[in-house]
Amino acid sequence: MNACERRERILKELKESNKPIKGHELSKKYNVSRQIIVQDIALLRARGEEILATPQGYIIPNSHRKNKLIEKIVCKHWGYDEMEDELRTIVDLGGRIIDVIVDHPLYGEIKSPLQICSRLDLQEFMTNIRETNAEPLSSLTEGIHIHTIEVNDRGSFERIKKALMSKNYLIKED
């Protein structure tokens, strides 16, 4: 198979998948290096394909979001433990955490895809952040950040908001 055929197959696989696919899985499947997959993804993006790189792998947004409610919430937390508790609360109440956004005073909006939809995803994310000693984006804005979350219905969203409010993570509108 040539490179163009491989890219088309990767694109088809991403479009049909309802979960992220790791780059190393694609490299094994197509018998190429991880760097070749990164290059393939970059070329697909350059031609206009919307492919996100998340901690769980590559995904095409909205490919799995039929009849789902997408909402944004503004939160604040003060460290790794609070961040983990906030994210766990959302996931445990049926939310998928699509991304995190901060409004940096110099750079403006900074957004990072998360795609956390289970406790396993959360555990992997928290392990990565702790092992790399990485600072969360919210450290740039004194803990204030926005999450885009996906839920099945309005009731699920309201339960998430209520739980986050009770834990003092949610910043309410005045």
Image (cartoon, rainbow, N blue to C red):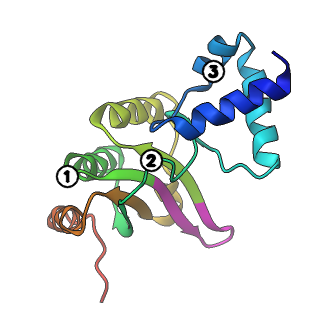
Q: Amino acid at mark 2?
A: His
Q: Is residue 143 visible?
A: no
User: Is the Cβ of the residue at disc 1 closer than 8 Å to that at disc 3?
Assistant: no
Magenta highlight on residue 100: yes
- Pick whichever of labels 2 and 1 is earlier in the sequence: 2
What label sits on residue 93 in the rendered view? 1
Q: Which mark is nearer the camera, 3 or 2?
A: 2
Residue depicted at x 44% and y 47%? 64
Disc 2 is placed on an element classified as loop
Residue visible at 68% across and 67% down? Answer: 107
Q: Could you tell me if the residues under marks 3 and 2 are in contact, i.e. CB atoms within 8 Å?
A: no
The magenta span reads 99-110
Local SS, label 3: helix
Of the 4 image quadrants, the one containing the C terminus is bottom left
Q: Which marked residue is nearer to the observer: mark 1 or mark 3?
A: 3
Q: Which residue is mark 2?
A: 64
Tell me the amino acid under the disc marked 3: Leu
Quadrant in which residue 165 is drawn: bottom left
Q: Looking at the image, is 62 positioned above or below residue 124?
A: below
Residue 139 magenta-highlighted: no
Marks 3 and 2, how far apart at CA:
20 Å
Q: CA distance from mark 1 to mark 3?
A: 32 Å
Nearer to the camera, 153 or 77: 153
Q: Residue furthest bottom?
A: 174
Q: Is residue 94 above or below residue 55?
A: below
User: Which secondary structure type mostly characterizes the magenta part of the structure?
Assistant: strand
Which quarter of the picture shows residue 152? bottom left
Q: Please give the residue where the numbered disc 3 appears in the rendered image.
A: 26
Foreground pick, 25 / 77: 25
Amino acid type of disc 1? Answer: Leu
Q: Where residue 147 sits: x, y (%)?
A: 42, 61
